[in-house]
Image (cartoon, rainbow, N blue to C red):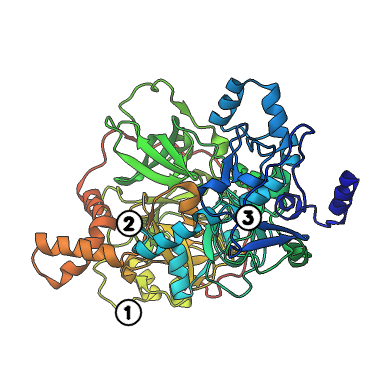
Amino acid sequence: TEHSSQSERKRRDSFGMFDGYDSCSEDTSSSSSSEESEEEVAPLPSNLPIIKNNGQVYTYPDGKSGMATCEMCGMVGVRDAFYSKTKRFCSVSCSRSYSSNSKKASILARLQGKPPTKKAKVLQKQPLVAKLAAYAQYQATLQNQAKTKAAVSMEGFSWGNYINSNSFIAAPVTCFKHAPMGTCWGDISENVRVEVPNTDCSLPTKVFWIAGIVKLAGYNALLRYEGFENDSGLDFWCNICGSDIHPVGWCAASGKPLVPPRTIQHKYTNWKAFLVKRLTGAKTLPPDFSQKVSESMQYPFKPCMRVEVVDKRHLCRTRVAVVESVIGGRLRLVYEESEDRTDDFWCHMHSPLIHHIGWSRSIGHRFKRSDITKKQDGHFDTPPHLFAKVKEVDQSGEWFKEGMKLEAIDPLNLSTICVATIRKVLADGFLMIGIDGSEAADGSDWFCYHATSPSIFPVGFCEINMIELTPPRGYTKLPFKWFDYLRETGSIAAPVKLFNKDVPNHGFRVGMKLEAVDLMEPRLICVATVTRIIHRLLRIHFDGWEEEYDQWVDCESPDLYPVGWCQLTGYQLQPPASQCKLVYRKASRESQSGSSKQKKKAKSQQYKGHKKMTTLQLKEELIDGEDYNFLQGASDQESNGSANFYIKQEP
């Protein structure tokens, strides 16, 4: 019987993923009732293209007279392929459904966009073949429009064009453990097959086709439809985590038709056999890929949660802030005292700059008391377990002491590593550090790093790794020598064994592209490049800007993201600054004197101006009398151990 033969065909399908293609390739036809007969249809012009499937010949119609709309489900198709003499329904199922339901219910179903029943999908095969052919009705019109329309350039920045035109490579998603899918990306690579919308088609409904990954760039993939072989004419970029990307077999499970692109639809007479041959042994996405993407984009931080965060105007202290919004795990925090809610700070939920309420008191860190005496309605303290955990350390033995020298990334100028001093030892392994030669007398520009922070280094680190060390401001004995400086200041270097020497297998390579936060203006995420790698330390360059705006960042920083992260999360990406600089510099020239130094003023206004102004303010202003120095608590924590990462001991 017909049913058994269909079952046999499905058993022979080793993938079980081509069922959705049956509607376009199987030689089936709609049934007719005993009291209705098919009307004769005028022959179609012989010069129209045809599709042959299993001996059955279907011809494309031209002109509106060849089309019909199902009165039950609203499907549009070729009229002569519709069921019954009156051609009112696309299938037996729709005809019977219409008979058993009122006309009002039918119209309501169409208005609500309800799909046909499962039974209708089974019986509805020839109309779908007709739908495959229906694009010819509009083909001539589209071709004429294409000839008359002028090319419209894409507005905004395109990662695909940027990477293709320059042969760039992007850092793989697995380099970013904090990003969506960072820990479960799996074996997604070139040649993996997916089911995607077929844009080379003029059918009235959305149809799909299979494509293979030609190139990966972070979340973005360059795809090529199956059947195009070496022809890249219709290659396209898309975000592999997007809602329209599915594993092979999704169409079969969802009842969606697979339709070959019209450019190549006559290339093969048996597309199903072609797909079986091409996909045997091929890889596709995991069946639960979209579920994993959705789960990895669920974030525990919610609006109205209260946290302690660094005061961006006085780095030595923290303040209470409230989560205003969460985008891709990034938090927009509004300081609690901000009446107009414009005094904000951006950071990732795993940033070392945010802590639970009470953290400052527990370790002895400076804290600015809020003028607000009680929580506002709806605000609540963030549970402590949601914050990033720091490694446990043992402060009972040999440990950091006040006055010890080291090298540290300047948080107010992240392109430099400076001579620094430990100014205060807090509890739980936290240290207050100051940059030599540029400290305020009251310590208002000290900053807090944990002992295991990848932003502090032992004396000699820069020399060993051929990094320029920034000497203390005003220090005249250049070139700078640590041995001489320690002797002159009567200081000692912090022991090398106390520093974090773990170097993960991070996967970054020089030249890789990514999206990075400009930490001098942390609301901005920019197109960036890895230009140097020193163990776990990355030099991040913002494309289009001068090197002086580069930043040293740890390989596990939550402020680095794969290519396509902004598109995936809906965050605004800042493109390379080649065009932006012209605007900024023009404004600078118009508003200021024509000094040679003014060329770089524009970028600093956007990225560093406010921060540098803050630095001056830190040196000129006294800390408000509302700061509190809490007593340090005892810490009995285990040692993190040591390694042989550094090969040069302190003098």
Q: Please give the label number shown on residue 43.
A: 3
Q: Please give the label number shown on residue 479.
A: 1
| Label 2 sits on residue | 412
Between the residue at mark 3 and the residue at mark 2, the CA separation in whole angstroms equals 79 Å
Nearer mark to the viewer, of 1 and 3: 3
Where disc 2 sits, the SS reads loop
Amino acid at pointer 2: Leu
Amino acid at pointer 1: Pro
Instruction: Work out whether mark 1 precedes mark 3 in sequence or the reverse, and give the earlier one.
Output: 3
Residue at 59% across, 28% down: 109
Badge 2 density bin: few <14, some 14–19, many ≥20, Cα 10 Å: some
How many numbered discs?
3
**Image quarter of the N terminus:** top right
Q: Is residue 590 visible?
A: yes
Badge 1 density bin: few <14, some 14–19, many ≥20, Cα 10 Å: few
Q: Is residue 458 visible?
A: no
